[in-house]
Amino acid sequence: MATGIILPSLFSIATSKSEALIFGSNPRNNANSQVGLVASNGPWTPPQYSQPALTILTVTVPNSSTGQTQQISYVFDAVFRILHRRVAHKTSHPVLTGANISDHVYILPSRVTLDIGMSDAMSSFANNVWVGSSTKSISAWQILKNLQISKTLVTLTTRLDTYSNMVIIDSSSPDENRTKHGLKASFVLEELLSASVLSTASQSARPQTSSSTQSGTIQSVSPNSSQIEQNVIPSPLYPSVKTYPQVPGAGRVSSNSLSQLSQ
């Protein structure tokens, strides 16, 4: 992100002092203006904010006023570290030579670990984003916590890759004296794999049973005398066929025309 070039060095300087200059400093204290972090008229705005952000967390939320959806882009004050992880799982059994390898290897969901920082002594990359609580650092933690609780799908844009359908599965943040006016947190996002079912038209062997017609349900029709003569057993063509009336469900009419069998 645009703030990821110089801010980590500032944070490392801050942690080396007896009192942190950024995480532990009060943005309302004008004494911080002596080190160039906070101006007397408000929070400090990093010069990198004039450049496009490289790490963005995008969330699609409904807009109650318009009834449509809108996208909110969250940009962190500092991104200390991003760990990208992609894993392919393969079978441990022997695979036949020449077999389709895709049947034996599948891709696991992508996982990204974000180590980020937020400071109350700095202005936000965009206005009216990290809001909702008394300070920006608390608002950032509450917003990301609620995204995890609500299982909201997010899109993570980084310098190396863009990840869609990501869910926050793990979040942690040490709260100590040097983070009184800031936030250091680590978030783990994992991809939620999705799939779709394809339906194809098939030919039925008994369309009168499985298919539907515009005429509705097809009613059965009793056979006429000619059909009975051709299909009944025994018949003049096969007079010696023995009947078994004791068989449950057995009938005296064949599904095949006996006249065709005799040819």
Image: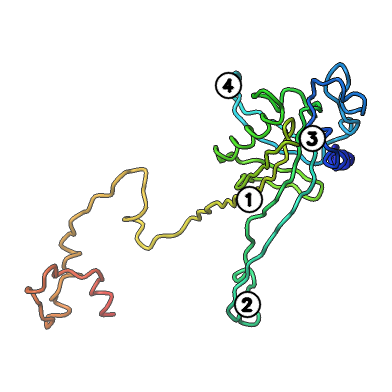
Q: Answer few, some or many: residues within 10 Å of disc 1's Cα (few below 14, many 20 plus, some between 14 and 19).
A: many
Q: Answer few, some or many: residues within 10 Å of disc 3's Cα (few below 14, many 20 plus, some between 14 and 19).
A: many
State the residue position of label 3.
77
**Which sits earlier in the primary sequence, circle 2 or circle 3?**
3
Residues marked 2 and 3 touching at CB (< 8 Å): no
State the residue position of label 2.
99
Q: Is residue 223 above or below residue 105?
A: above
Dividing the picture into quarters, in which one does residue 98 lie? bottom right
Q: Answer few, some or many: residues within 10 Å of disc 2's Cα (few below 14, many 20 plus, some between 14 and 19).
A: few
Q: CA distance from mark 4 to mark 2?
A: 53 Å
State the residue position of label 4.
64
Task: Please say whether residue 71 is visible from this viewpoint.
Answer: no
Look at the numbered disc 4 and give the secondary structure of its residue. loop
Tell me the amino acid under the disc marked 1. Glu
Picture coordinates of residue 194, whole percent (x, y):
58, 51
Q: CA distance from mark 2 to mark 3?
A: 50 Å
Look at the numbered disc 2 and give the secondary structure of its residue. loop
Q: Report the mark closest to the observer, 4 or 2.
A: 4
Look at the numbered disc 3 and give the secondary structure of its residue. loop
Q: Report the mark closest to the observer, 4 or 3.
A: 3
Q: CA distance from mark 2 to mark 1?
A: 29 Å
State the residue position of label 1.
191
Q: CA distance from mark 3 to mark 1?
A: 24 Å
Task: Please say whether residue 49 is visible from this viewpoint.
Answer: yes
Please identify the quadrant where the C terminus is shown. bottom left
Picture coordinates of residue 27, whole percent (x, y):
80, 24
- Name the residue nearer the viewer: 100 or 251: 100
